[in-house]
Image (spheres, rainbow, N blue to C red):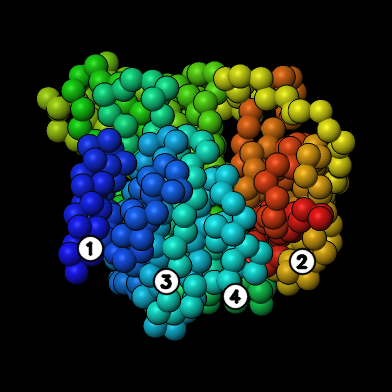
Amino acid sequence: MANDESHIRQDRRAWLQASAAGLATGAAWGLVPTARGATTTRAAAYVPRPRAADYRFRVQATTLDPDERKSVPGITVDGRYPGPEIRVRAGSSLRVAVNNGLADSPTSIHWHGLLVPAGMDGVPDVANYPIAAGRVYVYEFPLRQTGTYWYHSHWQLQEQVGLAGPLIIESSDDPHVDRDVAVMLGDWLHGSPYAALDVLKKGPPPSPSGAPAKMEGKPDLSDLAYDAFLLNGRGTQDPWTLKAKRGARIRLRIINAGASTYFRVRLDGHPLTITHADGLAVRPVTVDHILMGMAETYDVQVTLAKSGSYTLHAMAQDGSGQAIGVLHTSDVAPKANLALPAFDGRELDYRDLRAAAPTTLPAGPARTFELALGGNMARYIWTINGEAYPNTAPLLIRRGERVQIAMRNDTSMWHPMHLHGHFFRVLQGAGDDAPLKHTVNVAPKGTARIEFIADNPGRWIFHCHNLYHFEAGMARVFEYEA
Ligand SMILES: [Cu+2]
């Protein structure tokens, strides 16, 4: 017993140190002095590794009413949407014990944009078994990067009903700012997304909540008619606000966590200086607004030079609504501007993104893939090279290869294509300083070229981050050959 107690005290001491170092912010669900932790402490002298920041997540069924118009069943971490913010320091490692408190469903958490070992990626049937109801899985991995990321369920449509949250890895190289906040965008239904998907699979007709928007016509901007758009889990009736002193420099870590919504983002009265894309530093570029695909993140720096209240708008690309937040100086009350802004001026283009340092890949044999993004709208099947996941063969690659992918979008919808476990270079007229991203938008009838070095062995899913397109087949697995 004495032994056990001393281990617990050691753990508490470790926790205090971790807190002081900023490793365990959000300590309410922070380090847990378990038998497992005690074992780790005992082994520490023999297994040198950075001390993990510890989080404990309980996935549970919850009722949510973020826009205060209808309570609907949700699935969350600890009853909250967005889920608790993970905020850790570069160079540490992260441990999250996920307890599946759902009565009747598996779950599985994906750490979006993180270069994790394959067994920690959280994709059922690709990297992991799903976590059965009532079971715990401990995700633990070293942090090999810094920046703005997020986590979300990769099980069925749980992401749409609330299982997502921000994941921030702070760096000592971060520019000094007065406020540093995550801004998570989302889309929200008053009905079941599973019912909505069934309706999509049956085809028209359009009807109320959750039913498909019209499917014919030119570029198709949305399959679903959403009931609300959310910013940090709040509707426009009671928006998220941020108070800062006049002159404050503010870093907004914007995450498009929408399940199937592209957002146009702008801040009243302020240009947006983009400092990071998909977590990684870019040469700062100043624009008026950004079109963000699902799963993309942008870090934006703004300065509130003059007293006032300024609304941050995230308008759904189809114009059907917006999410807002309000930034204001401490001498002025926050006042929401609910008018949809004009998106004039300069919009961010991938060609504006330049990595902070050259990103050329090490020499190695090249392997190329041509991938056609397709769809059958009548049956709501989405494909890559004519095949719908999971009835697809893996795309084989080998460690050390430069993998080059040319995509062609044969459909009338946008597809934000996301690769797990790697960053890729976006080759859009860029040279040595092509930006590194984990998600690339492919416009209707458009093309995109990317390349990455195969340096993280395992099986990795590559998929459209429109949740409904993914569920309906738009995915392939990259698999390392032995
Ligand atoms: Cu898609």
Residue neighbourhood size for the residue with mark 1, other residues' Cα within 10 Å, grouped as few (<14), some (14–19), many (≥20): few
Q: Position of residue 261 (x, y in %)?
A: 53, 51
Q: Do the numbered discs 2 and 1 sit on residues whose CB atoms are within 8 Å? A: no
Q: For residue 315, what is the image quadrant?
A: top left
Give the label on residue 199, or none.
Answer: 4
**Residue identified by numbered label 3:** 136
Q: Amino acid at mark 4?
A: Val
In the rendered view, does 186 fall on the left or right side of 241?
A: right
Q: Amino acid at mark 1?
A: Asn
C-alpha distance separating marks 3 and 4: 34 Å
Q: Residue at x 56, y 49 (%)?
A: 116
Q: Residue at x 45, y 43 (%)?
A: 48
Q: In the image shown, does 371 or 195 lie closer to the viewer?
A: 371
Tell which tag, 1 or 3, sits nearer the viewer.
Answer: 1
Q: Do the numbered discs 3 and 4 sit on residues whose CB atoms are within 8 Å? A: no
Image quarter where the C terminus lies is bottom right
Image quarter where the N terminus lies is bottom left
Q: Amino acid at mark 3?
A: Val
Q: Residue at x 47, y 59 (%)?
A: 139
Q: Secondary structure at mark 2?
A: loop
C-alpha distance separating marks 2 and 4: 19 Å
Confirm whether residue 323 shows in the render.
Answer: no
Residue 106 against residue 346 in the figure, above or below: below
**Mark 3 or 4 closer to N-term?**
3
Q: Amino acid at mark 2?
A: Ala
Give the label on residue 3, or none.
Answer: 1
**Residue identified by numbered label 2:** 388
